[in-house]
Amino acid sequence: MKKITLLMTLFFTSSLMFGQVLSEDFEGGGPFGAFPPTGWTNNEIAPMGGSWVSASDGDAVGYNSPNTILYDNGLLAGTYALFNSDALGNDGNAENTALESPSFDVSTASNVLLSFNHFFTAGYGGQGFVEVFNGTTWIEVANYTGASQTDSSFGLETIDVSTELTGVANAQVRFRWTGDWAWGWAIDNIVVTAPSCVDPAVSWVDFSTTTADITIDITGDFELEWGEFPYTQGSGGNTATISAGDSYQFTNLTPGVSYDLFVRQNCGADGFSNWVEAGFGTSPDLSTLPYNEDFEFASNQNFFVNKAITFAGTGVWNFSQDDLSDGDDTNDFANSGVTTFFSNNTTVADPADAIIFVGPFPLTTANEYIFSFQQRTLAAAEPTRPAKDFDIVVAATNDGMGTSVLGSFDDVDNVTYTLRTGSAFNPPADGDYYFGIHDRTDVLAGVALANTIFVDDLSITSQPLSIDEFDQNSFTHFYNKSLKTLNISSETIAFTGIEIYSVLGKSVVNNSLTDTSVSIDVSALNDGVYLAKINTANGTSTFKFVKN
């Protein structure tokens, strides 16, 4: 026996349509009118499969009767079409019956929409299919089913059938029920429209720190609404209009932020198109160094450009976030926070060629710049798992062309994060530059297991070039790896002081000096690249050394 339940709380929406080419509300049916309506067909595909009928009591099949669920929740009104599988009983006859519309002409339309109100009571194997005829065959555009009444479908449905029906002169729509003593399906207010006010397609084409540009695929009048991500339409954002145009520039934006955008076409007497949602964003302000990035996205950031991140090459860098809530850190790879980027070419047959860029940074010839980041691999290398190879690069563009190598790392397989630093970069000319990491790992024969480069916590720092008021040939410097000392000597000029800075700009040594030959103990410093500034009575000079 079927269980009868009472439906409690349901929700619905509605919309307005223009350019109708088919409309049927079934108000001519019922006990005193013909059903199906003129031009419609009750097609019993399975013999003895039952028929669609008209009804007007609002009583949903499968729920405590009497009720008005079809009117209240299905949005049906007055008379409607109904297939009542429950009323056919357990007669052993499989049901496959379609209520088919008359043909209609949309041969000149480029936008075709189908809408209807309905209540499909799920359970006992019943299924509902919405199908359209393209002049040759019936094509399914929606279906409804479910194991129980909690899976029921109802309310207004709007389906874009432009792909299936554009250019068809003898199109049709039908509603096909299949089942055997299941529940039922009620349908009303069937409308097919070919609106001249088509939905726009919006493309985000350019951006800066405070501006963003969009284009629209058609020329016309448009209404725009936008707000900082995540933004809900109608919640008090910014608005603008476009008159007889197809582009717009947003100005006075916040650097490094994402925005949600809603656009609709205004077609005057033909009404409005649907609102189309899109997005755009701005890049961060990179004019001040040092620049540090841990890849953790703020709540108002939704695009990589908000982090000044772009990609080049034939390979792919991927975005990953650790799951700190699962109690298992096996697959957690960030050095700090939860976010990291990774590159892996093991599953393809070609060498890696994937670059992740950060920038552009406005650099000058008066300074030199250091790019560093934390790096690890997924696993230690073995005969069936490759080590990784990568370069630290810099370029005037982010298309992967014209890169200069600031450091090369071959056969790396460190599974703990290690600081990687490129050599100091002195720009050949003032301008914008991008720093990058180029995964160029070779494919090894017999590789069966993946290996991956992870990067996190990158930094770009700057240091003025040396002010050589004394002859640089008059002094020498070298790092003694065995003794962990930095040694400097001068032929004639006594040193007055030395300052040593990390690549992050932090002062780690600041000593006064009085001699022409000095040995500085740097054993307490972490391995890495440092900048040393030596002072004399005649001036200063700065040089880089690597402590290892």
Image: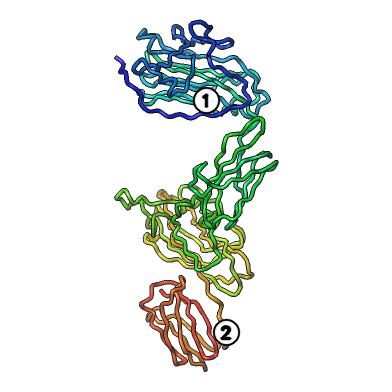
Residue 31: horizontal and vertical position, in percent?
Answer: 48, 6
Q: Residue 169 appears at what percent x and percent y?
A: 66, 20
Residue type for callout 2:
Asp
Q: Residue reaching furthest front?
A: 236
Say which residue appears at 43% left-offset and 29% top-offset: 11
Q: Is residue 195 visible from the viewing direction of this image?
A: yes
In the orientation shown, which residue stands out farthest toward the bottom? 492
Disc number for residue 468:
2
Q: Residues within 10 Å of mark 2 (few under 14, many from 20)?
A: few
Question: Which label is found at residue 246?
Answer: none
Pointer 1: what residue?
Answer: 141
Q: Is residue 276 above or below residue 338?
A: above
- In front of the other: 449 or 547: 547
In the rendered structure, which disc, 2 or 1, sits on the residue that comes first in sequence? 1
Q: Is residue 326 left or right of residue 254?
A: left
Q: To which quarter of the image does residue 378 belong?
A: bottom left
Nearest-to-viewer mark from 2 and 1: 1
Left or right, 195 with reference to 97: right
The residue located at (55%, 41%) in the rendering is 277
Query: Looking at the picture, how far across and down is residue 199, in whole percent?
Result: 61, 35
In the rendered view of the protein, which quadrant contains the C terminus? bottom left
462 versus 417 height, above or below: below
Secondary structure under tag 1 reads strand
Please tell me which residue lies in front, 13 or 306: 13
Residue under the image location 51 percent in, 92 percent down: 493
Look at the numbered disc 2 and give the secondary structure of its residue: loop
